[in-house]
C-alpha cells in the first residue's frame, strides 16, 4: 500500500483515486494523530470517508470552489 500524504485536504476525485488504487490518503486532519503515534492502519479505517469536520469542509468549499 502506498501513502498519499498532504498538509491540506484532498479533492473528491483525488480521494477516490487514492482509495481505488489501494493508497492511504493522509490529509491534514490525520497528520496530528499520526504524529502522536496513531498507527497508519488505524487511519486506514477512515480512508475515503471524507475529510474533517463539516465546518472545515464548508469553509474549504467557500474558499476553493
Image: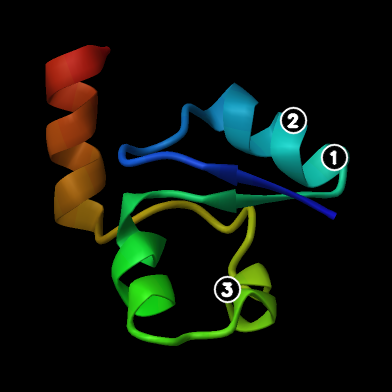
Count how many numbered circles sit on residues in the image.
3
Q: CA distance from mark 2 to mark 3?
A: 17 Å
Q: Quadrant of residue 57?
A: top left
Q: Position of residue 33 (x, y in %)?
A: 36, 78
How far is disc 1 from disc 3 in space, using C-alphas?
16 Å
Q: Secondary structure at mark 2?
A: helix
Q: Where on the picture, by quarter, is residue 32?
A: bottom left
Image position of 27 with respect to 14: above or below: below
Q: Is residue 4 above or below residue 44?
A: above
Between marks 1 and 3 in the image, the one whose residue lies nearer the viewer: 3
* Observer-nearest of 32 and 14: 32
Of label 2 and label 3, which has the lower sequence position? Answer: 2
**Horizontal and vertical percent position of residue 61:** 23, 26
Q: Position of residue 62 (x, y in %)?
A: 14, 22
Contact, CB < 8 Å: mark 1 with mark 3? no
Query: Residue 33 bears which disc, if any?
Result: none
Disc 1 secondary structure class: helix
Structural crowding at the residue carrying mark 2, measured as other residues with C-alpha within 10 Å and reported as few (<14), some (14–19) or many (≥20) = some
Q: Which residue is mark 1?
A: 20
For residue 14, side relative to residue 56 (left or right): right
Helix, strand or loop status at disc 3: helix
Which residue sits at x=61%, y=37%?
A: 15
Instruction: Say which residue label 2 marks.
Output: 17
Q: Is residue 21 above or below residue 40?
A: above
Left-right relation of 16 to 36: right
Q: Give the labeled residue for mark 3.
A: 43
> Are the residues at dot 2 and dot 1 in contact (C-beta closer than 8 Å)?
yes
Camera-side residue of 31 and 21: 31
Image quarter (top left, top right, bottom left or bottom right) of the C terminus = top left
Amino acid at each position: 500500500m502506498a501513502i498519499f500524504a498532504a498538509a491540506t485536504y484532498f479533492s473528491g476525485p483525488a480521494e477516490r483515486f487514492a482509495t481505488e488504487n489501494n493508497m492511504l490518503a493522509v490529509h491534514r486532519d490525520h497528520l496530528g494523530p499520526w504524529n502522536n503515534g496513531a498507527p497508519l492502519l488505524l487511519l486506514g479505517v477512515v480512508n475515503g470517508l471524507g475529510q474533517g469536520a463539516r465546518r472545515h469542509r464548508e469553509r474549504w468549499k467557500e474558499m476553493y470552489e
